Amino acid sequence: MLGDIGRSFHESPRQSKGAHRIMTRSNADDDRIRAIETRGSAQRAARARRSRPAATPSRKSPVRTRARPVPPEPDPVLEDEITAVQTLSVEIQPIGGIFGASNPVLVDDETPGLIGRLLRRRPTSAKSGEPGLLADLDFRVLWLSRLLSQTAQGALLYALLILVVDLSDRTFFNSLFVICSIIPSIAFGLPAGLVADTVPRRGLLVLLNLFRFTFMLLLVGSDVSLAGVFAATLGIWVIHQFYSPTEASVLADLVEPNRYTAAQAMFNLALTISQVLGLIIAAPILLRLGGPKLVFVVAGCLWLVAAAMAALLPAMQEHRSRRRGSGRTLRQMLGDGWRFARSDRFTFEAIIDDVLVGVGMSALVVIMPFYLERILGTSKENTVFVFAPAALGLVMGIRFAPRLANLIGEQYLATLSLFLFALMVAALGFVEQTYDFLNDTLLFPLDQLTNAVGVSPLIFVAMLLSIPAGFASAAVNVAARSILLSRTPGNLRGQVIATQSLIGNIAAILPTALAGIATDIFGVKPIAVGIAVCIVVAAMAAHMLGRRHADLPNVVAQT
């Protein structure tokens, strides 16, 4: 045993020397292999850069080396050596690339629900520096043209209504004046949409404003009569059937799709301002100063300026180049708007939501005088005063609708706002219970507020309910029109908008006629609740019908 230990002791130096030589040779081979791999990797990278497109990122080398000059042309011997040596290449990635990519990939075909949409919604602070729509010259010109033309129309219709009241002593003529605004929509709505999608839209806006100016010249130069008033009313509303879809289509042509909601809100704001200027301010003052003819002169001048501003808009011809229908009949082309709206689920639902708000408003206009007298205990002449706060809600809806649409989407905004509107209408039927709930349960100081304002508690509650009702109606209109503009092709926008107007006018005839009769039979409060229930049921039925027959995926293109 001692001998074996001694032999091992004496042999160990020789083995150490041999092992040292083997390790030296192995280190040399490793250095040689590393050098070969480095040169080979550089050559492969150079060839890859020459063969790949410029946008393809190059693969990282698995070995970290110092910067070297570009090697010469590849050596065949070197390639053989690389082949002879087997190496294990490991691609090194940063931890973020494995567990959390710095640029996450979002799956577009996922359809999150409302909660998922809220959680996944990205902040829009990056767009906060985007200039406002009025900073764009073309949109500013179109917006001012709309403001002037709608101001003129509001002042004119107010003056014509006063003339009907002064020239006749029968309420039948007042109803006939309202019918004059419905008949042109039914008779000319669809042809007007087809014209808006066929002829140059800028020239059509100019021509229609000049037609309005011509009507004013005829009214100024002739004696005022009842027949002339009704003829002018029909003419103005016929022109409006062509002007409205054309103007809305021009809006979509000028604005980028991702700003449709904000643009429609600005358009609604122009309409609200024009109603205040024309109906409340200009028309009463002008009638007092110079009579109806002064209103005709001012309205004609406003339409002349609106025509000049429309002429400054850029030419829009894209919708004409995409027109389909060579060899198609007029009847087939008139139905294009309805066929598209019926085939597109979200356009159909948006149209129905907006139409239902309009129908509800028309029915409320009929029962409101009875509501004020029988429920609120005030004169029907105070209708404007009681529901004046609705204008505040209207402005708030126009202001915040784009933000809400960006948060939850236009589809959810339109539907939820419609249900909010129906809830406020139903609350009018439970106005006493609503007062008790707010004052006793939620402990709102309504008693102190009503004493300070000097109105009855029920009137104060009705004024409060009108604020969210106005907000909801504005939000529905902005969101629904944004969906319609974003999903409708440019060569069909006018027809789809005209189809919506036609559906709204036809749908409002029967409820408006029945609301007054039903109020005398059942009372005001049950009819208010019935209007709300009908709105909700019709909305749910329309949404179910749209989902049953729609072929499109369950997603709304966000704008």
Image (cartoon, grey):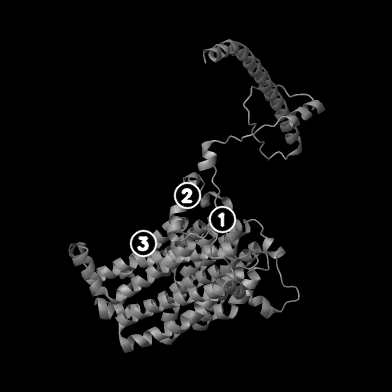
Q: Nearer the viewer, residue 7 or 169?
A: 7
Of helix, strand and loop, which one carries label 1? loop
Residue type at mark 3 is Leu
Residue 278 appears in the rendering: no
Q: Residue at x 19, y 62 (%)?
A: 445
Q: Is residue 302 left or right of residue 197?
A: left
| Mark 3 surroundings within 10 Å by alpha-carbon count, few (fewer than 14), some (14 through 19), many (20 or more) | some
Labelled disc at residue 392: 3
Where, by quadrant of the figure, is residue 415 drawn? Answer: bottom left
Q: Is residue 228 left or right of residue 76?
A: left
Q: Nearer the viewer, residue 384 or 99?
A: 99
**What is the x, y in percent for residue 220?**
53, 72
Of helix, strand and loop, which one carries label 3? helix
Q: Is residue 66 left or right of residue 503?
A: right
Q: Nearer the viewer, mark 2 or mark 1?
A: 1
**Residue 430 vertical placement versus 210 (above, below):** below
Estimate the spatial distance between the alpha carbons at disc 3 and disc 2, rounded to whole Å: 30 Å
Residue type at mark 2 is Arg
Q: Which residue is mark 2?
A: 122
**What is the x, y in percent for residue 411?**
48, 64
Q: Which residue is mark 1?
A: 108
Residue that sits furthest to the right in the current view: 76
Tell me, yes or no, whether the two marked residues, 1 and 3, touch with CB atoms within 8 Å: no
Residue type at mark 1 is Asp
Tell me which label, 1 or 3, sits earlier in the chain: 1
Tell me which label, 3 or 2, sits earlier in the chain: 2
Tell me, yes or no, whether the two marked residues, 2 and 1, touch with CB atoms within 8 Å: no
Where, by quadrant of the figure, is residue 291 drawn? Answer: bottom left
Of helix, strand and loop, which one carries label 2? loop
